[in-house]
Image: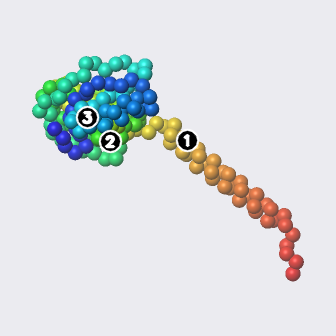
Amino acid sequence: GEHGALAFGELAGELVGAPREVREAVLRWLAAREPARGRYLAIRPPGLPALAAAPGRPGAARVLAEAHSSIRHRARVHLERPGLVALKVGFHPFWRLSVDGAPAEPLHLTPCFLGAVLPAGAHELDFRFRNPGYQKALALGALVLWLLLGGLGLRRALARRLERPPPAT
């Protein structure tokens, strides 16, 4: 059932709300040690459509191949029955998922994993972490501003030094 960063399990249901709003329910779920039994809850923000009927255990599921880095995890899996595949990395909204080459929405699973509900059969999964372009632009802008302010401060310091009369000898 488990191999590397992937785990197969059962989607036992979903909680609707922001992570802070469902915190108490998640803590109760974790205290019951449900994830250790291969059962997961999906956390869905309000306004998104509900999940389809939650499948049970995927049966004889296995990982056929996998490769990963810090920002990407690719795997080929086979499920005997429809089921849940959980990637054991921290959930973040910048994670993207494609299943068999088609974009899919990754699930936010307790205790803070990514996941996907898959039909029976063989599937290619590709999880990628993608920072949006505006983050890079903001970082570059902050660097440029810091350099400009530093240069302006240096220019003022040099101007003050040049304005002072030379020391008396």
Q: Of marks 3 and 2, which one's residue comes earlier in the chain?
A: 3
Q: Quadrant of residue 42?
A: top left
Q: Secondary structure at mark 1?
A: helix
Q: Position of residue 85 (x, y in %)?
A: 24, 33
Amino acid found under the numbered disc labelled 3:
Glu
In front: label 1 or label 2: 2
The C terminus lies in which quarter of the figure? bottom right
The residue under label 2 is 89
Q: Please say if the residues under marks 1 and 3 sit with CB atoms less than 8 Å apart.
A: no
Q: Which residue is mark 1?
A: 138
In percent of the image, x 39 and y 23: which residue is there?
A: 16
Instruction: Tell me the number on the disc at residue 21.
Output: none
The location of residue 56, given as percent across then percent down, is 19, 25
137 relative to 163 in the view: left or right:
left
Which residue is identified by label 3? Answer: 34
* Closer to us: 20 or 31: 31
**Position above or below: 103 against 158:** above
